[in-house]
Structure formats: C-alpha cells, structure tokens
C-alpha cells in the first residue's frame, strides 16, 4: 500500500506538467485546428531565455516571467511568420516539423548540446507521510500553477468578450467574420496564449529533469500529445484528467512492471481510447470537431 | 519480367570485374591500403554530433581529433599526418550504415576508429568485416567486439560491462560488511543485462535484493529509486549512462535516501556528473561514490598533464572530462598501433601489429590483444570520490567476462614516453 501511494504521488506531480503542456496543444487546436508539432522545440527556446534571465538576475521568478513573455512573443512570431501560410492541416504539420528542425539545430549551434542544470525555486524534497515520501513543496507549486492557469483560462474563455470572440472564430470563422470578429487576430491571440502556457510547463518540468538541453522537451511533447488526444483535443478539462491519468499510469507501470513496459502501456492506452472513444475521454460537442 | 532476369547477370558481370580488379590489386607488391598516401593516413568514425545523444558523447571525437593534431605537429607517424574524418550519425543505426559506407567507399578510410554506440556500431560490424576494413576500438563495452573468429577485423577498447560489474561486485563484497544489501539499476538493453550477469557471477544468483531497470526515454527514475529505498538497499550498482547516474543520485538525495553507489565507467565520470548536478551540490552528493576505470585520470598522472596541455592547445580548452581522457587515449593507442604496423602500413599489418601484443596502450594495465582474443584490458581499477576529487584507491582487479575468478592486480601503469608520441 505504501508503495502504491508513493507511486501515485510521483505520478500526479509528473502528470500535472504533462497536462499543462497538453493544454497548450488544446488551445491551438481549438483556435486553428492545427496540432502544433513545434510546441516542444518552441518551449525549449523560451526555456533558454528563462534560464538565461534567471541566472543573470539570480531570481527564478524573473526567469519564469521572462520565459512566459518570450513564449508569447515566439507564439506571435511563429503564427504570423510561419503558420498562417499553412492552408491545409497537413501543411501545418509539415511546417511545424520543419520548424522543430530549424529551432533545435539553431539551439545546437548557439548553445551546444550540454545540459544546463536548473535548480527548483522551492525545495523539491518530499514530505514523509507515515513513512512514505509523498509530494514536495515543488510538486505543490506545480499543481497550484497548473490549476490556477486552467481556472484562469476557463474564466477567460467563458466570462470575457475576448474569450467569446476566440470561441466564436474557432467555431464558425465565416460567421464570426461577418459579425465583425477579427478571426485572424483571434488565431494569433490563441497562439500567443498557447506558447506562453507551454513555456511555463517546460519551466516547471526542467528542475525535475537533468536540466536544459535542446532536446529537453522531446519526451514531454510526445506525452502531452498523447494526453491531448486521450483527453479530447478540444477539451482543457480532458487534458487535465488525461494528464493526471497518464502520469499515474506511467508511474505505476514503471514501479510494478518495469521501465521497459511504460511506453507500451501509454501506447496501449492511446490505442484503446482511439478505438473506444475516438473523440477523447472528455468529448467536445460533436459539431465542433473539425 | 525480363528486367528481373537480366539484373543478376549484370550484377555478376560487375562483381566479376570488381573481383578481377581486387585480385590485380592484391598481386601488386607493396600495394598500399586505401587511405594511405606518402604523407597522410585517413581514418574515420561515426558518432552523434546532433540529437539527444550528442550531449553525452560529442566531446569524444573532438578529443581524438585534438590529439591527432598534436601528433601531426610532432611530425606524425612514420612521417604521415593522421586525418580524422568524423561523420554525424545522430545515434541512429540507419544513419550509421549510410555514413560508414561513405567513409569506406568515398572517403576511402584506412580504418574506422572508435565508432560510437552498441546499436549503431553493431549495425556496421558485418559490413566492415566483410570489406576487411580494420574496425578499431568501438566506443562501447558490449561483448560483441571480442570475437576474432567471426569478426577478425574488430578490436574492442572499452572494458566490457560484465568485467566491470564483476570487479565492482568484488570490491563491494570486500568492503561492504555483513549487513550490505546489494541492488542494481540498469539500462534496459545489453548494457544492463551484461552488467547484471557480471554482478550475479560474483554475488550469487540471489545476491541482488532488487534489480530495477530504466529506459533512456524515461523522464525520471523516482519509481525505481523508491523501490530501492523501500527494500533497504545499502549498496546500489549502476549500469547507467552519466545522465541517469546523475538522476539516480539526485533523486535519492531528494528522498533523503543515503546509499553507497557503485557505477560502471560508462556512467561514473565525476566532471560530467558535476555538470549535470551542479558544482554546488555535486561534491556533497557524490562523496564516496565508487566507480571503475581503466584509463589514466588521476590528477597527478603524467598522462593527464599531457592531455590537459593538448586540450588547451589543440581543443580550445574544452571542459576536461572523462571523455577527453578517453578520446585522447584512443588516439594515442591508434597511433601506437600505426607505428607498430611498419613504415608502409597496410590494413593487414595493422591487425598483425595489434595481435602481436606490442601495442600496450596507456591504460591502467597493458592491452591484452592477441590472435585469439580481441579483448582490450583484462580488468579495471576502483575509483572513489573524496573531497570532490575522483581518483584510484589502489585497488584493481582482473577477471574474464565469463564466470572466472576475480583476482587482485597490482602491476604498474605505463608512463608516457617521448611526450606521448609513439616511437617508430
């Protein structure tokens, strides 16, 4: 039982970060019907900005702020400079994959392949509850940031004019345009929001990993993509539920069956969900699917 | 259909022509091997310079190239400069096959030196041996490279994982005390399995209380370290690459779990681990960290002094790590083999020189190559980190990669002569 609790605790912390990153994919999907395959590479670029600022100022929070701002800027640049030329979904995917190569190679040239260690802003030593190491202050910070962000985004989408315009332009671009919504601008706003969220997720991930490296978010992206699909590409709530589920599943499988079985378990889950509920666990309204 | 029928015939004609050409080549006396001219020798390698594996390994080929540049400035070997062609394979076996064919067919290399990785180099092992290209010192501790009957052109360099594990296990038994609980964290491929096999040879089939594995795609090892903590493991062996050694030690520290760590040389390089863990906490976390090694890296070693100087002058003062020592040792050993292969070296004379036993290398113990064994070193020395310095503690063991006994070793390590330039 101790072991089970420990594994679940570990999985929750890891799953939250994945959920946050999946949220960024969901945001772009909702606005532009594009799966942003460049999300991982873009987040790594902003993480370098954040870690650079954090080292220069000595404050993690300044770094986080810089990372989020850089994330927003990069989202704007990528949407305006690259993605708006994608006229078909496949074109968007290919453009994004090209962007991954450009960004990762440029980073490799500029900063090299070495890992830069990133220290957590608060302690990552777990508390011991009845002899079981369970959750650290850093895990709590991660969960709090993730929940806060999701709540904020939910308010934005449901309670503000901007949110209404964002939803309208994703749902019915033509009609929205007729009604005076600047659909192209809404798409840009979604990209800015999404990349800022991804930047934050990457930053939260780094202290739990070896550190920063041009490939630091590769695995995170693959997992987040799985999470987004399992949860339903349209659904922020689905991303959270699926993120936690996948995190706990991975931790349990690693703990009880061994590390080699983990990727297989995640893939099996993906296959089962696609077979049984192709719209995702927390499905959106049928009519809103692309 | 007719296309299909004629194709083999065309092929046959072409290969007959090639055979004739090859035979003609053989019959010419003093014909030099590919890659050898009056003033140069071209050798090549495949290694990850891009992609996720680059972080751990891209510094090796730079160190090799730097040492060759140093040798060339000292006049080269038999008056020939060594040119080192480095091809990026991104640690992808499919790419390895392409770039190694390029090396052999287009760049006409004399030999392939220090091709990196078990899955990558394993994919060109047959190709190199079928084409009789000397395949020297693959950067991997797999058992695959020591098989002179099947692969007469391949010579190992790293001490294999099984031998390292046996030595580390013997050390743990000798030093561990009666209450020791032995456990292992291993990579989920041949690295981990070969290593665990070695441990079990010494500790007994039930000698390991917990055997955990990780995959290189894992984001963390919390679940594995948690299992070791719960089982009360006191001595944890690591068949991990440096990145995962750092993760294991860092995770255990986070969980306030003190243990004695004993890592393979492939994951036990102190300067590299400091890079991962951070210079502020690494000396504390790694105090007492045990590893194995077979190359000179003691701070007071003459080899290290020489390599540091070469690193400053020919390698832009890159960080000096285990990879630097490893790369330069490979370069020195190749130069020694080349010197022993005679004034007009051929691929055959290079292999003969290695099998003669004259090539001793610069390791802790002399290289053990012979006609029926292409195994490099017979054993390893034990290193411990004390006060932020990793050094040999004077204990070394020799053993085989089977179930032979582990014997203490106390021979002298060879010192550099002639400024690290092999005598010709």
Image (spheres, helix red, strand yellow):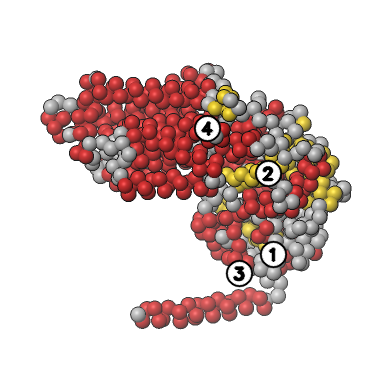
- According to the image, label 1 marks what residue? B147
Q: Position of residue B350 (x, y in %)?
A: 72, 63
Q: Crowdedness of circle 3 by 10 Å Cα count: few (<14), some, many (20+)?
A: few
Q: Nearer the viewer, residue B17 or B178?
A: B178
Q: Answer yes or no: do the residues labelled 4 and 3 have beta carbons within 8 Å? A: no
Q: Earlier in the sequence, mark 2 or mark 1?
A: 1
Callouts 1 and 4 on one subunit: no
Q: Residue furthest left?
A: A178
Q: Nearer the viewer, residue A234 or B421?
A: A234
Tell me the mark number nearer the camera, choosing from 2 and 1.
2
Horizontal and vertical percent for residue A261?
Answer: 51, 48
Mark 1 or mark 4: which is in front?
Answer: 4
Say whether disc 3 or disc 2 marks the residue closer to the N-terminus. Answer: 3
Of badges 4 and 3, nearer the viewer stands: 4
| Picture disc at residue A5 | 4
For the residues labelled 4 and 3, the Cα–Cα distance comes to 55 Å
Distance, label 2 to label 1, CA atoms, is: 33 Å
Residue at image mark 2: B209
* Quadrant of the rendered image containing residue B121: bottom right
- The residue identified by callout 3 is B130
Label placed on residue A195: none
Q: The residue marked by circle 2 belongs to what chain?
A: B
Compared across the picture, whether B204 is left or right of B407 comes to: left
Q: Are marks 3 and 2 on the same chain?
A: yes
- SS type, badge 2: loop
Q: Is residue B207 above or below residue B3?
A: above
Residue at image coords 73%, 31%: B287
């Amino acid at each position: 039982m101790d072991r089970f609790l420990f594994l679940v605790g570990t999985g929750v912390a890891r799953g939250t970060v994945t959920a946050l990153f999946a949220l960024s994919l969901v945001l772009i999907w909702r606005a532009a019907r594009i799966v942003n395959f460049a999300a991982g590479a873009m987040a790594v670029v902003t993480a370098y900005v954040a870690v650079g600022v954090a080292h220069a100022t000595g404050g993690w929070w300044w770094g986080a702020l810089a990372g989020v701002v850089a994330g927003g800027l990069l989202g704007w640049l990528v949407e305006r400079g690259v993605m708006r030329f994608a006229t078909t979904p496949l074109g968007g995917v290919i453009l994004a994959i090209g962007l991954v190569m450009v960004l990762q190679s440029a980073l490799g040239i500029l900063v090299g392949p070495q890992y830069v260690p990133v220290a957590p802003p608060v302690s990552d030593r777990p508390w011991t509850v009845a002899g079981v190491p369970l959750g650290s202050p850093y895990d709590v910070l991660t969960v709090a940031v993730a929940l806060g962000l999701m709540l904020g985004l939910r308010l934005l989408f449901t309670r503000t004019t901007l949110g209404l315009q964002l939803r309208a332009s994703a749902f019915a671009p033509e009609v929205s345009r007729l009604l005076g919504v600047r659909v192209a601008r809404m798409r840009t706003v979604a990209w800015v929001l999404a990349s800022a969220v991804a930047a934050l997720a990457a930053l939260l991930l780094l202290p739990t990993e070896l550190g920063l490296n041009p490939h630091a978010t590769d695995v995170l992206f693959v997992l987040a993509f799985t999470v987004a699909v399992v949860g339903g590409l349209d659904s922020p709530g689905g991303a959270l539920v699926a993120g936690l589920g996948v995190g706990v599943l991975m931790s349990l499988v690693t703990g009880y069956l061994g590390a080699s079985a983990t990727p297989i378990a995640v893939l099996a889950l993906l296959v089962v969900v696609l077979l049984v509920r192709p719209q995702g666990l927390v499905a959106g309204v049928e009519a809103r699917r692309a | 259909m007719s296309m299909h029928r004629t194709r083999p015939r065309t092929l046959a004609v072409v290969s007959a022509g090639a055979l004739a050409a090859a035979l003609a080549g053989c019959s010419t006396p003093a014909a030099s091997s590919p890659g050898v001219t009056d003033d140069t020798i071209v050798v090549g390698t495949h290694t990850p310079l891009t992609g996720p594996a680059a972080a751990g390994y891209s510094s090796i080929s730079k160190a090799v190239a730097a040492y060759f540049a140093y040798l060339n400035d000292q006049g080269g070997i038999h008056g020939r400069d060594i040119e080192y062609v480095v091809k990026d394979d991104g640690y992808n076996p499919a790419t390895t096959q392409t770039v190694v064919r390029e090396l052999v067919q287009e760049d006409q290399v004399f030999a392939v030196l220090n091709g990196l990785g078990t899955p990558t180099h394993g994919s060109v092992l047959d190709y190199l041996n079928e084409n009789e290209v000397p395949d020297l010192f693959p950067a991997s501790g797999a058992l695959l490279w020591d098989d002179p009957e099947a692969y007469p052109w391949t010579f190992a360099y790293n001490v294999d994982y099984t031998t390292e594990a046996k030595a580390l296990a013997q050390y743990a038994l000798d030093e561990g005390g009666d209450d020791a609980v032995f456990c292992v964290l291993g990579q989920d491929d041949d690295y981990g399995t070969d290593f665990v096999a070695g441990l079990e040879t010494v500790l007994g089939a039930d000698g390991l209380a917990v055997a955990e594995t990780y995959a290189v795609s894992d984001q963390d090892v919390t679940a594995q370290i948690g299992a070791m903590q719960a089982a009360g493991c006191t001595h944890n062996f690591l068949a991990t690459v440096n990145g995962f050694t750092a993760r294991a030690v860092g995770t255990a520290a986070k969980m306030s779990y003190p243990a004695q760590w004993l890592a393979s040389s492939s994951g036990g390089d102190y300067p590299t681990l400091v890079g991962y863990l951070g210079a502020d906490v690494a000396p504390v976390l790694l105090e007492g960290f045990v590893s194995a090694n077979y190359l000179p890296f003691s701070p007071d070693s003459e080899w290290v002094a020489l390599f540091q100087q070469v690193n400053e002058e020919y390698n832009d003062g890159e960080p000096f790590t285990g990879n630097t020592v490893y790369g330069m040792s490979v370069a020195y050993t190749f130069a020694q083999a080349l010197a022993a292969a005679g004034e007009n070296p051929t691929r055959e004379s290079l292999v003969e020189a290695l099998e003669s036993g004259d090539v001793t290398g610069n390791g802790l113990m002399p290289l053990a190559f012979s006609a029926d064994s292409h195994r490099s070193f017979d054993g390893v020395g034990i290193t411990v980190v004390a006060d932020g310095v990793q050094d040999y503690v004077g204990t070394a063991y020799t053993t085989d990669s089977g179930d032979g006994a582990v014997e203490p070793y106390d021979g002298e390590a060879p010192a550099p002569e002639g400024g690290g330039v092999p005598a010709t």
